[in-house]
Amino acid sequence: MDGRERIRGCLLGGAIGDALGAPIEFDSLMAIRAAHGPAGITSFVRAHWPPGTITDDTQMTLFTAEGLLRAGRGSKFFLDAIADAYDRWLLTQGEQGHVAPTGWLITHQELHARRAPGNTCLSALRSGRRIGRDGELNFSKGCGAVMRVAPIGLVCDTPFEIAAEAGGITHGHPSGYLSAGAFAHVVGSLMAGSSLLDAIRAARIELTRWPDHEETAGALDATLALASAGAEPSAERVESLGEGWVGEEALSIALYCALVAPDVRSGLLLAVNHGGDSDSTGAIAGNLLGAMYGYDALPRDLVDTVEARELIERVADDLASVFLDGEPPDRDRYPA
């Protein structure tokens, strides 16, 4: 499988997981089963928005990719470009931003819909203070940092460091930004052809080099222990890892689902049918499953009906062209 297929699979898989989980994000497992049957949801369903609607998780992932593309291959300024991209995302949410609304991505109206964006991301970006992970902007470890950094893992040579710093733009707690770093490291290993198990182990080693890593490392250990227990995967076992509202729990749940599921669809459904942050755990698991199995393994009925499919595929192909093929960025779409 070539890298282009993994990149497409990662971004589309994340969008599908996001759209699957969004309608049940705030529901308990009991409520999900009462409304949708013992198996929970099995496809896109309508809630506040039409079936297949993406949320801020996918929106911010696309703006992460835009930052990378504006910086270009080999850049020393990825973080500045990513921070600018997040400020453009802030503009799409009807907020006062700190950069000009330039470029191609911001012209897509589906990205301007406000889909329950995270309060930490909004408040941090509103402040305009780019103090990074060592600052005192907040002490949040919400999952808004980890859910958006898959593109960094797909194309960057030092994904842990860049994703941790990018997570620190909005989230000041170590478990917020280190979970982002660990996730990007896993995705980078998958891009290089590693198994998911080996990728998690490699991220665990890298994690220990960072201060205050213990909580995130413990979440990875819990993932591996539960996956190796041999028990049949279930929503109850997913919930034993937490609810996913914070970074290390969202990462743990997504990794577990990708490890134990026999195929992409099963992994996606396992990742969303629980009483927690279903769209974020679904998005992260979808990123992982798409990078593991590639674009062609994604469920076709979900690919065909997820919102913004063509836009997501275009961004994925642009990442592949610039970072895999060495072509210069299209400066009409991604001005420097």
Image (cartoon, helix red, strand yellow):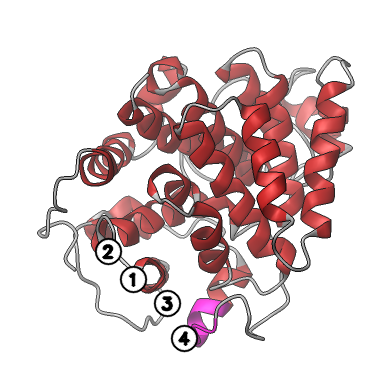
262 horizontally vs 97: left or right:
right
Q: Tag on residue 77?
A: 1
Numbered disc 4: secondary structure = loop
Give the extent of the magenta segment: 124-131
Residue drawn at (29%, 35%), measured in percent from left and top?
A: 313
Numbered disc 1: secondary structure = loop
C-alpha gap between disc 1 and disc 2: 6 Å
User: Which-is-in-front pick, marks 4 and 3?
Assistant: 4
Q: Amino acid at mark 4?
A: Gly
> CB of mark 2 within 8 Å of CB of mark 4?
no
- Would you call the spot at circle 3 few (<14 residues within 10 Å), some (14-19), or many (20 or more)? some
C-alpha gap between disc 2 and disc 4: 20 Å
Q: Amino acid at mark 3?
A: Glu
Q: Amino acid at mark 1?
A: Phe
Please, is residue 276 above or below residue 232 in the view? below
Q: Is residue 125 shown in magenta?
A: yes
Residue 231 placement: quadrant? top right
- Residue holding disc 2: 71
Q: Is 266 in front, or is 158?
A: 158
Q: Is residue 147 shown in magenta?
A: no
Disc 2 or 4, which lies upstream in sequence? Answer: 2
- Would you call the spot at circle 2 few (<14 residues within 10 Å), some (14-19), or many (20 or more)? many
Q: Does residue 111 appear in this view?
A: yes
Disc 4 or 1, which lies upstream in sequence? Answer: 1
Numbered disc 3: secondary structure = loop
- Residue holding disc 3: 95
Question: Which image quarter is the C terminus in?
Answer: bottom left
- Residue holding disc 4: 128
User: Which-is-in-front pick, marks 2 and 4?
Assistant: 2
301 horizontally vs 141: left or right:
left
Question: Which image quarter is the N terminus in?
Answer: top left
